Image: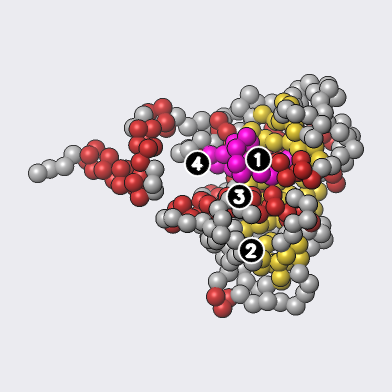
Amino acid sequence: MRTPSAFVILAGTCLVLSLAGAEALLVNVLDVRYWRCVFKKTSQCPDDDIKFFLYTRNSMYREMVDVARPASLKYSSWDPDHKNVIIIHGFNGTESKVPMTFIRNAYLVHGGYNVFTVEWASLTRFPCYLSALSNTKLVAQCSAQLYSFLTAHGALATKIHCVGHSLGAHICGMMSGYLSHKQHKIIGLDPARPLVRRYGSEEFRLTRDDAHVVQVIHTNAGALGEVSQVGHVDFCVNGGRFQPGCRGHRLRRARCSHFQSACYFAQTVMPDRRFLGVPCSAGCPATGRSVGRLPGRAMPMGEDTPDGASGMYCVTIRHNNDCPFD
């Protein structure tokens, strides 16, 4: 009995979805609208699909920032004396859901920050990874416009840093290509690996040349996250590949571990919470005998890392919970 090729493909799709524990997505996969990926062909900012929001402790609501309106900041709760952080989500993410909200809320609890978030969810929907990768260039260009908007209103470059997760980390790096001066600080949370290194030049991925201070936190290196040392200072957490508390099949563990970088970083922003790394000789992921401790002092990871720090540090964080954890 001959099996139609379409049935074979459908059966294979069903098997993959079942193995991934995502049987509920089958209806979407069979819907042609599910595959309508958006490839941005424009290079003009502002763009309606890229939005900026401001959160402060002085306002109960998020405020949209319109860089085309010079008075947008003047009539907002923006405090020119505070530091500024720009938070950029990654693939299939959004600024209004976890884990990016953990980072946002941690800065609000910390105090002394104007928290800006970049929303580009409509350009990075699952399963459209290739189009999302292509769209990072425009998101970086428009986010650089937000950065320039802040400096034009008196914000010092040393009081602005960009925090990006996954593809968002690369967007932070790409922003410098659209600025007249290099950014002061970038914190890359498990920068995305799939297809980035193979198809993207250094211009389109995060490197230590993108800011005076580039810190990277690895939690799923070699799978969804970049490997080895990317920034001036890198932290390889729990070996860098899989995180404790992330359970299930391999893809589920990888995705969970990838997002855990945002949760670890958010914890460092909170008052009185520090994770210390020790100098180590291994790359990331670091396993078995390849891990060797080097002479030197322990280094705090995340928000309290000194700007002049450099090298690779291995961090051990013991917990049993998925993101978020106690």
Mark 4, Cα crowd under 10 Å, few <14 / some 14-19 / many 20+, is some
Helix, strand or loop for disc 2: loop
Pick out the residue farthest to the front: 326
Q: Which label number is shown at residue 101?
A: 1
Seen from this angle, which residue lies furthest left?
1
Which of the marked residues, 1 or 2, is nearer the chain's N terminus? 1
Mark 4, residue position: 129
> CB atoms at circles 3 and 4 under 8 Å apart?
no
The answer to whether the residue labelled 3 contacts the one labelled 2, judged by CB atoms less than 8 Å apart, is no
Residue that appears at 51% across and 35% down = 125
**Quadrant location of the C terminus?**
bottom right
Residue 246, can we see it?
Answer: yes
Instruction: Look at the numbered discs 4 and 1 and tell me whether their residues touch, using CB distance below 8 Å.
Output: no
**In which quadrant of the rendered view does residue 240 lie?**
bottom right
Identify which amino acid the numbered label 1 is placed on: Thr
Label annotation for residue 45: none
User: Looking at the picture, does residue 316 appear above or below residue 180?
Assistant: below
Q: Residue 317: which disc?
A: 2
Are there few (<14), some (14-19), or many (20+) residues within 10 Å of tag 1? some
The three-letter amino acid code for the residue at tag 3 is: Pro
